[in-house]
Image: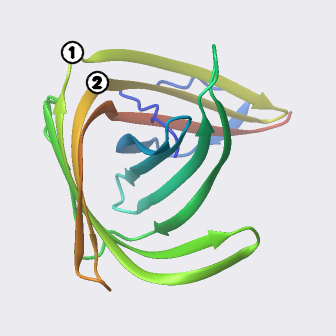
């Protein structure tokens, strides 16, 4: 993930772009997402440690018509590090466990309208990667509670594009806030639960957008 959405809210008016032409109905979209990273270290000896990162994120967009797009992934990466003067030397940092889903299924993803809190539950079929080899390790379920940290920032974006007799104009508005994320993992095959703890390397985002297309007829 890992993308923080640009979302849009606005009214778009497209003036006639040719002598005769046709404009499609405005397309409206809403979207929301969150991303979170949990970092930890495990000491091997006085000079060596293993650095581990867990990541989880989701992106959801929906059109006015009701058509929705959903994507979410969960992964674990790790690196073996040697303590050195100045900057430690780390090797690895590969995604050793990975899973993604394109349907929330029985899970849940909610953000309150003010981006003050959020909740996420999902289950992923996971694989373990070792170089070019991979094997299934069963499913992992994650539960994440999100609480905003700081103020919500708002951004606006608009652009127009033309190519011959085809033109499109787009405008929108997005909101983002840094968050604290509390995470819990459950390895369903082993019936084992891991508490990821809290992290502030997280964020929540939401917004709305609109675009209008116009195709003219050349004189």
Residue count near mark 2 (Cα–Cα under 10 Å), binned few <14, some 14–19, many ≥20: many
**Which residue is found at the position 35% from the left and 35% from the top?**
208
61 or 17: nearer the viewer: 61
Q: Is 89 located above or below residue 217 in the figure?
A: above
Q: Is 201 located above or below residue 23 in the figure?
A: above
Residue 145 left/right relative to 103 = left
Label disc, if present, on residue 196 of the rendered structure: none
- Number of labelled discs? 2
60 or 143: nearer the viewer: 143
Q: In terms of sequence position, does the residue under pointer 1 or pointer 2 come before the other? A: 1
Verify CB contact (< 8 Å) between mark 1 and mark 2. Answer: yes
Residue count near mark 1 (Cα–Cα under 10 Å), binned few <14, some 14–19, many ≥20: few
Residue 131, percent across and down?
74, 67
Q: Which residue is mark 1?
A: 150
Residue 150 left/right relative to 160 = left
Q: Quadrant of residue 15?
A: top right
136 or 62: nearer the viewer: 136
194 or 211: nearer the viewer: 194
**Which residue is found at the position 37% from the left and 79% from the top?**
139
Q: Secondary structure at mark 1?
A: loop
**Quadrant of the snapshot with the C terminus:** top right
Q: Is 162 located above or below residue 42 in the figure?
A: above
């Amino acid at each position: 993930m890992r993308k923080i959405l640009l979302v849009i809210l606005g009214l778009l008016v497209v003036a006639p772009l040719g002598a005769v032409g046709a404009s499609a109905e405005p397309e409206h979209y809403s979207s929301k997402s969150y991303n979170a990273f949990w970092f930890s270290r495990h000491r091997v000896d006085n000079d060596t440690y293993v650095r581990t990162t867990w990541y989880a994120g989701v992106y959801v967009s929906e059109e006015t018509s009701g058509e929705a797009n959903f994507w979410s992934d969960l992964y674990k990466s790790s690196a073996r590090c040697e303590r050195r003067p100045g900057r430690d030397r780390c090797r690895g940092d590969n995604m050793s466990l990975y899973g993604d889903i394109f349907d929330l299924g029985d899970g849940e993803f909610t953000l309150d309208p003010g981006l003050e809190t959020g909740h996420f539950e999902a289950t992923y079929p996971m694989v373990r990667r070792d170089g070019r080899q991979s094997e299934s390790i069963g499913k992992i379920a994650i539960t994440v509670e999100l609480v905003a940290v700081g103020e919500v920032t708002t951004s606006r974006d608009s652009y127009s594009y033309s190519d011959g007799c085809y033109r499109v104009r787009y405008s929108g508005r997005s909101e983002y806030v840094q968050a604290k994320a509390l995470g819990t993992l459950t390895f369903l095959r082993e019936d084992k639960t891991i508490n990821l703890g809290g992290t502030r390397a997280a964020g929540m985002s939401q917004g709305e957008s609109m675009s209008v297309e116009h195709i003219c007829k050349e004189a």
